[in-house]
């Protein structure tokens, strides 16, 4: 099984676990004399099996990510880099948006609002980080589809 396939299965399991949990909650109580729409014991069994499979899959994925390297960087390092780039990009984008706002002045005597940061410089830096994010994500995706799950 390729790492990418395991990641897809993990995503599917997370959705299934969420749905099973919701179905269990929906069938946790019934009016006296009524039967639940679904058997809670069966749902619990499915939930436990799904969680056990998720645990197994996560361990294999994590092990694979730690041992797979590309140009001296582990897949774990690349994922951490991608995740922090996303946080940094969001923060820079929010700052640029806030600093780019203009206040309407109706006369020259009104207070002038000025940006405290160099928006042009920040935008250029944001563009560079966005390129780095695309390249990092491409490396991760490539490794995901070419690496066998350990």
Image (tube, grey):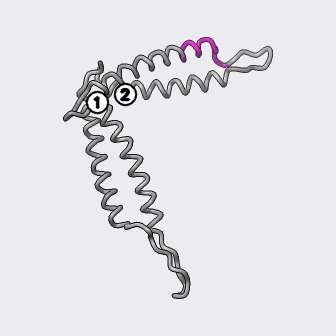
Q: Residues within 10 Å of mark 2 (few under 14, many from 20)?
A: some
Residue at image coords 43%, 53%: 91
Read off the magenta span.
Answer: 37-47
Q: Residues within 10 Å of mark 1 (few under 14, many from 20)?
A: many
Point out the residue furthest to the bottom here: 108
Q: Look at the picture and state if 9 lies above or below 92.
A: above
Q: Which mark is residue 7?
A: 2
Nearest the eye: 48 or 74: 74
Find out whether the residues at labels 2 and 1 contact each other: C-beta distance under 8 Å. Answer: yes
Give the dominant element type of the magenta stretch: helix, strand or loop. helix
Is 139 within the magenta?
no
Q: Position of residue 80 (x, y in %)?
A: 35, 37
Residue at image coords 25%, 38%: 139
Q: Which mark is residue 17?
A: none
Horizontal side of 76 relative to 44 (left or right) equals: left
Q: Quadrant of the N terminus?
A: top left
Q: Position of residue 45 (x, y in %)?
A: 56, 12
Give the quadrant of residue 62: top left
Instruction: Measure the C-alpha gap from mark 2 to mark 1.
Output: 8 Å
Q: Which mark is residue 144?
A: 1
Secondary structure at badge 2 equals helix
Q: Look at the picture and state if 125 lies above or below 40.
A: below
Q: Earlier in the sequence, mark 2 or mark 1?
A: 2
Is 42 within the magenta?
yes
Secondary structure at badge 1 equals helix
Residue at image coords 34%, 62%: 123
Q: Quadrant of the C terminus?
A: top left
Q: Position of residue 64 (x, y in %)?
A: 30, 23
Residue at image coords 52%, 24%: 17
Horizontal side of 28 relative to 146 (left or right) equals: right
Q: Look at the picture and state if 19 lies above or below 91.
A: above
């Amino acid at each position: 099984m390729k790492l990418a396939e395991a990641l897809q299965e993990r995503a599917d399991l997370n959705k299934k676990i969420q749905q099973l949990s919701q179905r269990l909650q929906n069938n946790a109580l019934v009016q006296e004399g009524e039967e639940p729409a679904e058997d809670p014991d069966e749902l619990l069994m499915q939930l436990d099996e799904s969680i056990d499979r998720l645990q197994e899959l996560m361990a294999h994925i994590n092990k694979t990510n730690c041992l797979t390297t590309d140009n001296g960087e582990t897949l774990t390092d690349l994922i951490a880099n991608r995740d922090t780039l996303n946080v940094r990009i969001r923060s820079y984008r929010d700052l640029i948006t806030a600093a780019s706002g203009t206040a309407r002045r109706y006369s020259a005597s009104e207070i002038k609002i000025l940006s405290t940061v160099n928006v042009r410089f920040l935008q250029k830096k944001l563009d560079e980080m966005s390129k780095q994010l695309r390249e990092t994500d491409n490396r991760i995706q490539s490794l995901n589809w070419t690496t066998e799950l350990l």
